[in-house]
Image (spheres, coloured by chain):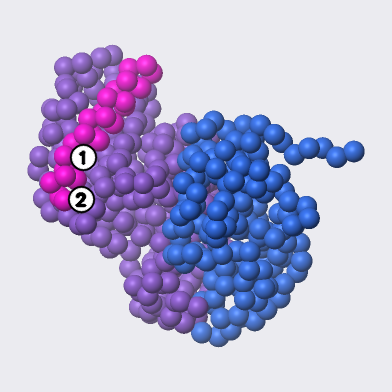
Amino acid sequence: MAEMEIEMKVNGRSRRAVVEPRLTLADFLREECHLTGTHLGCEHGVCGACTVLLDGDAVRSCLMFAVQADGAQVTTVEGLGSPDALSPIQEAFRDHHGLQCGFCTPGFIVSVTAFLRDHPAPMVEEIRSALSGNLCRCTGYQGILAAVQAAVSDPAPTTG
Amino acid sequence: MKPAPFTYHAPTDLDEAVELLSELGDDVKVLAGGQSLVPMLALRLTAFDHLVDVGRIDELRGIRADGDALWIGAMTTQASVERSSIAAGAVPLLSRATPLIGHFQIRNRGTVGGSVAHADPAAEYPAVAVTLDADLETISVRGRRTIPARDFFLGTWTTQLADDELLVGIRFPVWAGRTGFAVEEMAQRHGDFALAGATVAIALEGQTITRCSIGLFGLGSTPLRAPVDGLVGARPADVAGKEIGDAAVAALDGVPSDIHASGEYRTRVGAVMVARAWASAVEEAGRG
């Protein structure tokens, strides 16, 4: 169980660490990179709170080891927007009350970011299906669905 | 850190991978997409001294026509299959089964070979492989071999693969002519493993069935083929889907019972899934 040196780009910044192979990518992001926006709910792939983008694809960061992401580009919710400059999807979640306690929200935001990038004009059934991989225990999903629909019909305002 | 400690190996070619598997003996496990193995490790349902991650071996990836079959590399992700127009055209049953696997985030990591080698009896890809008589290509230090899908699955999570053997790719036969394919399953929530499911593949010539295969999943310790006696040579208009469904589950034995559903209920659901898949496959073939 020798420790291994790994390096990856997280939100555009190079991160290098020596880790045990059994460290999940989620724990690496939270504990080594101090990026605690990636939340851990179930830690076995059911809840989706830990979703991040791995080379652009939405994946469960609790279902892979940090050593598997050696050399990869990772984007966490921190890389999508900031409190001063929310992403259009984050704005839509705020405007349509797509959250209550907020625990599941980073996973939803990351999943929806990848989904809308790949499906810019989804049908409502496709949105429901895309949301099915993330669990929310507060809002009952209707606000989340409304937020995603708003993000579809109201693309990011162009600046200038 | 929840899993027990292990040593991680990430070979970049097949020779290195099979050497490692041979050297490391019986306390080694192949790590593919990890969407089943990693949760099992995290819950400590299982533990290994060594994991061999085959995700960095390029030869294990790809989707390509290969004679009268479609070859898919074991490490090809389910998401790649879902996006592949080649797969959709050549093996529609595989494409149609893919969105039923987990969620899109799972399919971005989960692999064709991992699904098949994991051998969950309620999983879609093993059932598709059995339904279509796919061939599974493996490699070990002893050489390569081809295992017919119908011989591959021995029981829940148990296959013919030896500890030191690696699944390389799967050849799915391409059915020519006027064909119809359908998969139906019932799960408690979208993305869950099915309580019961069925696959149907048929080919017609004129109004006559010339070839047909019915697969069942979630209804035994392995994916199963249902008997299709009397169907080849018959006209679809003369056979009722309900009767085919009832016949498909009539001889089932040892249908699993658990907190989610009794064996009796699963059997009834299985019959309905066969009937629905039959109707939809017949309809498609009729249009062809």
Direction top: furthest residue: B206
Colour of chain B in the rendered structure image: purple
| Residue B92: assigned label | none
Q: Earlier in the sequence, mark 2 or mark 1?
A: 2
Mark 1 neighbour class, 10 Å CA radius: few under 14, some 14 to 19, many 20 or more: many
Dot 1: what SS? helix
Residue type at mark 1 is Val
Who's the residue at 57% across and 72% down the image? A27
Who's the residue at 16% across and 51% down the image? B262
Quick one: B172 or A58, which is closer to the camera? A58
Name the chain under label 2. Answer: B
Magenta stretch bounds: B262-288
Which residue is tagged 1? B269
Any magenta on residue A36? no
The mark lying in front, picked from 2 and 1, is 2
Quick one: B91 or A147, which is closer to the camera? A147
Residue type at mark 2 is Ala
